[in-house]
Image (cartoon, rainbow, N blue to C red):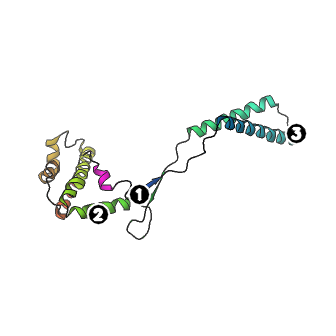
C-alpha cells in the first residue's frame, strides 16, 4: 500500500493541478541598507509626530518619543516574523471536462477516478496497480473509523465485517479484470461498514 495508492488514483500533482505559491515577500537586502532604511523611517516618523504634536500645542521630549517609535518598530518586526507563510493557490490547467476551467479540485479528482476506473475495465494490470491499493486503503480507513480495527490488526473481525468476497479480493488480488458489478459489490460492502 505504500505504492502511492490514493495519490496514484487521484492523479499525480503534475497531471491536472499545479500549485503556485504566492510571490515571495520582499527581496533580501544587505544589512547596512536595511538598518539605514530603518533609521530613516524612525527619523521621518519622529519629525512627523513632533510636527503634529507641536501643531496641536503639545510638547513631548525626544528622549521619550524616539524609544517609543523604536519599540513600535520592533513590535512590527515581531508581527511580521510571526506571520504565517502565504497560502499556495491551486490552479487547474485546462479544464475539468465540463467546458470551463472552474478550478474545482473535487470535480477534477472525480474525473480522474472515472478515467482510471474506465481504463481498468480493459487493463487488469492497471486495476491491480491503481484501483485495488486505493480500495484497500479506503477499506482500512473505514474499518479504523467505524470499528477501531484494520485488516492487519484484527484480520478475523475484518473478514467478518467485509464479507468473504471483498476480503478475498483485497487479500489475494490476482490479475483478473474489473467488472462493473464487482465494483458495485465492493462499494456496497464498504458502505455497509
Query: Which callout, 2 or 3, points to the residue nearer the camera?
Result: 2
Q: Residue at x 15, y 42 (%)?
A: 155
Up the image or down, 169 lies above or below 99; here it is above
Q: Earlier in the sequence, mark 2 or mark 1?
A: 1
* Nearer to me, 72 or 43: 43
Badge 3 is on which residue? 57
- Residue 81 in the magenta stretch? The answer is no
Residue 135 percent coordinates (x, y): 23, 52
- What whole-number distance in Å separates the C-alpha atoms at marks 2 and 3? 76 Å
Q: Which residues are magenta?
A: 2-12
- Which sits earlier in the primary sequence, circle 1 or circle 3? 1
Q: Residues within 10 Å of mark 2 (few under 14, many from 20)?
A: few
- The residue at 19%/57% (across/down) is 125
Considering depth in this image, is 103 or 184 the residue closer to the camera? Answer: 103
Kind of element beneath mark 3 = loop
Q: Decide: is 100 above or below 70.
A: below
The dot on residue 115 is 2
- How far from the left and from the top, in percent, is residue 81? 58, 38
Q: Which of pointers 2 and 3 lies earlier in the amino acid sequence? A: 3
Residue 52 appears left or right of 36 = right
Residue to which mark 1 is pinned = 17
Mark 2: which secondary structure? Answer: helix
Residue 174 numbered tag: none
Where residue 86 appears, as percent x and y from the top left, is 52, 47
* Mark 2 vs 1: CB contact within 8 A: no
Amino acid at each position: 500500500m505504500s505504492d502511492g495508492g490514493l495519490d496514484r488514483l487521484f492523479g499525480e500533482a503534475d497531471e491536472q493541478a499545479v500549485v503556485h505559491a504566492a510571490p515571495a515577500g520582499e527581496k533580501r537586502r544587505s544589512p547596512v541598507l536595511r538598518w539605514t532604511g530603518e533609521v530613516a523611517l524612525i527619523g521621518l516618523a519622529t519629525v512627523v509626530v513632533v510636527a503634529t504634536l507641536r501643531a496641536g500645542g503639545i510638547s513631548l521630549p525626544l528622549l521619550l518619543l524616539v524609544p517609543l517609535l523604536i519599540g513600535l518598530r520592533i513590535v512590527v518586526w515581531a508581527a511580521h516574523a510571526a506571520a504565517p507563510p502565504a497560502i499556495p493557490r491551486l490552479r487547474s490547467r485546462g479544464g475539468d471536462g465540463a467546458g470551463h476551467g472552474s478550478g474545482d479540485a473535487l470535480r477534477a479528482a472525480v474525473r480522474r477516478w472515472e478515467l482510471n476506473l474506465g481504463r481498468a475495465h480493459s487493463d487488469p494490470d492497471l486495476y491491480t496497480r491503481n484501483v485495488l491499493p486505493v480500495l484497500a486503503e479506503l477499506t482500512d480507513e473505514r474499518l479504523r473509523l467505524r470499528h477501531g480495527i484494520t485488516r492487519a490488526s484484527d484480520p478475523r473481525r475484518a473478514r467478518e465485517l467485509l464479507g468473504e468476497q471483498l476480503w478475498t479480493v483485497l487479500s489475494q488480488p490476482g490479475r483478473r479484470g474489473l467488472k462493473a458489478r464487482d465494483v458495485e459489490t465492493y462499494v456496497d460492502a464498504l458502505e455497509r461498514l
